[in-house]
Image: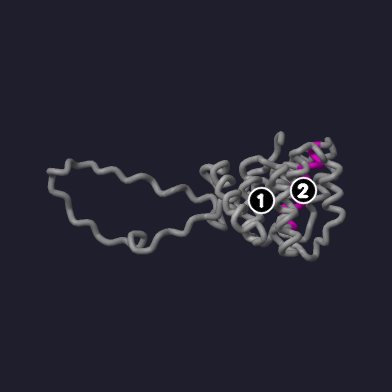
Amino acid sequence: MDEDPELAFDHALAASRRGGRLGVVREAAGMTAYAAGKFSEALREFRTYRRISGDHAHLPEMVDSERALGRREKALQLVDEAQLDKLPVTSRVELAIVVSGIHLDSDDPKAAVRALEIPELNPRRGFPYSPRLFGAYAEALAAAGRQEEARKWSNLAARAERALGLAVEPEPEILDLVDDEEEQPAASTRARDVIAPTEAPAQTPQKGGDE
């Protein structure tokens, strides 16, 4: 899905033709459609997944899809109808970020700031969602003309990334500096040769655009 979302969506559709009544299949179709920028299809699949499973975790993607299709009022209506207490914490955070973006699209930075002032906006504790939440808050503050506060939260976002290991540079490429014919010293075994390093979770880009 990260490398070729269009192809991933094709595979998900093939699975849907064979097991369209399985929630996990419709969820995969929605996720790949969303990643490929096919927002109408994503809405259809997420709605079907929600109906089958009763799970509302993909509400942020649904709201963002409505936003991407230019239906801001419909997007905000979805939020108003949502039972936020039934959403996982990561979904509540992503939903707040999407709603803030909708208000920025509507040239209402004050509302964008308010949308992000949720309990999870805690500068003293870091979670996987914190860098995105802090960064979105910094963007909203800057749009509202609160530059000093925006810099503070932007710095907090960077610090949270480093603390959570999300800003670690990739392993540098190792090049051989001697010819194959030359004698090379025996290499000692390193821990990373035995245990693969843990990859940081990929950040989800903000979606938007035409259908």
Q: Which mark is residue 89?
A: none
> Left or right: 138 with respect to 17?
right
Inter-mark Cα distance, 1 to 2: 13 Å
Residue at horizontal 68%, vertical 61%? 124
Residue pointed to by mark 2 = 63
Question: In the rendered structure, which amino acid carries the disc numbered 2?
Answer: Val
- Residue 2, percent from left and from top: 54, 46
Residue at horizontal 53%, vertical 42%? 4
Which one is closest to the eye, mark 1 or mark 2? 1
Mark 1, Cα crowd under 10 Å, few <14 / some 14-19 / many 20+, is many
Occupied quadrant, residue 103 = top right
The magenta segment: 92-105
As helix, strand or loop, the secondary structure at mark 1 comes to helix
Principal secondary structure, stretch drawn in magenta:
helix
> Left or right: 205 with respect to 171?
right
Is 8 or 118 nearer to us in this picture? 8
Occupied quadrant, residue 109 = top right
- Residue 96, percent from left and from top: 77, 52
Is 92 or 112 nearer to us in this picture? 92
Q: Is residue 96 highlighted in magenta? A: yes
Mark 2, Cα crowd under 10 Å, few <14 / some 14-19 / many 20+, is many
Residue pointed to by mark 1 = 30
The tag earlier along the polypeptide, 1 or 2, is 1
Is 149 or 60 nearer to us in this picture? 60
As helix, strand or loop, the secondary structure at mark 2 comes to helix
- Residue 199, percent from left and from top: 48, 56
